[in-house]
Amino acid sequence: MLYYLFEYLNKSMDIPGTGVFQYISFRSALAFLLSLLLSTIYGKRIIGFLRKQQVGETVRELGLAGQNEKAGTPTMGGLIIIFATLLPVLLFARLHNIYIILLIVTTLWMGTIGFIDDYIKIFKKDKQGLKGIFKVVGQVGLGLIVGSVLYFSPAVTVRTDTSRVDVFKTVAQGTTEAVILPAPIEEKSTATTIPFFKNNEFDYAELLAWTGEGYEKWAWLVFIPIVIFIITAVSNGANLTDGIDGLAAGTSAVSVFALGIFTFVSGNIIFSNYLNIMYIPHSGEMTVFIFAFVGALIGFLWYNSYPASVFMGDTGSLTIGGIIAVLAIAVRKEMLIPLLCGIFLVENFSVVLQVSYFKYTKKRFGEGRRIFLMSPLHHHYQKKGYHESKIVTRFWIVAIMLAILSIVTLKLR
């Protein structure tokens, strides 16, 4: 909203200084600071309200050290993250931008699913919460919306010519002069990026090439199911990661910050040409949302770090996973998710392995056997006697290493 006010003041009244709101970097910085302040200052009030409403966590007996001490800790803290993210976005982002609209819808959609799940657990005294089938239906519904918009909306385009354009050239006297950038050729495309490869663009439509001429118009049959799968997988991965104080919020903040770098360079014609990567018009605006989101996550950590004063609950974890998935898909970096969100992947995979191996050995040997002492993986280390803080810190370090490696793929091809 403030963006449009300052745009009006700049264009109509030519007030000095109002033009600074045109810069994504400036608005992103403001969004980060405001979200950080909102989550830390008003987070305490929200926690107090949740405690007053007796919105406390019911902890299952898992035989973990210090577990019983967490019983009654307020949950639904994801409301802090959602509030501290959306308010700065509404103030500083260009709200007519298709990517911002998608991210706001994703936040509210997944937040609602998580809120219903937490509500059933707390007020209906049902430890299972929202039935899994309804969660999946909600995730699939969001995937259909996001996939359809990205595929059919004329506002979502990419640059199809991948030739590099040098912005400056050196003349004989050693000075430089600007070169006018040609207008990029923009069109609808289901192309994405394959990391670590030089010619690293792959079009999902090519998967239908065997059907013959005109296969491109049926690309949505491949693209939309892929979007649904990614959103479902990443949101569930974030949900499983939220098991000990500060783990999900901290690792997510690192991953989202890395995605912020991708959105900034992909939405800037100069940087995208310099790095020889896909130029995605208007995607740079997502940087404002991302920095607001990172600020909210860091502010939430103020209260969620060990010993936690509040848990994010499914209200937060499902929202975090959904946002990360949509960001990666929108910036055409979804194939980096296994690397960028490696913590989510390992946590998810540890559960799949544990359950599958247990069922297999029970059928084969008559008794179920386990690979890990407990899954998800962070509980395995708890069982081995590691303190929560040590586990979380080491997971953060791994997340930072994975994020740096993901960013390096911009040049490492």
Image (cartoon, grey):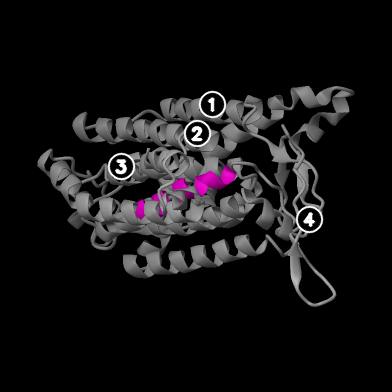
First-in-chain label (3 vs 4): 3
Along the viewing direction, whichever of 335 and 46 lies nearer the viewer: 46
Residue found at x 38% / y 54% = 30
Residue 316 visible in this rendered orientation of the protein? yes
Along the viewing direction, whichever of 307 and 279 lies nearer the viewer: 279
State which quadrant residue 245 falls in.
bottom left
| Residue carrying label 1 | 145
Left-right relation of 158 to 15: right
Above or below: residue 202 compared with residue 272: above
Q: Residue furthest right?
A: 213
Q: Amino acid at mark 4?
A: Val
Q: Are marks 3 and 1 in contact (CB under 8 Å)?
A: no
| Residue carrying label 3 | 83
Q: CA distance from mark 3 to mark 4?
A: 41 Å
Q: Amino acid at mark 3?
A: Phe
Q: Amino acid at mark 2?
A: Leu
Residue found at x 33% / y 68% = 389
Mark 1 neighbour density, 10 Å: few (under 14) some (14–19) many (20 or more): some
Q: Are marks 3 and 4 in contact (CB under 8 Å)?
A: no
First-in-chain label (2 vs 3): 3
Mark 3 neighbour density, 10 Å: few (under 14) some (14–19) many (20 or more): some
| Residue carrying label 4 | 165
Left-right relation of 386 to 287: left
Range of residues picked out in magenta: 283-296
Q: CA distance from mark 2 to mark 3?
A: 17 Å
Q: CA distance from mark 3 to mark 1?
A: 23 Å
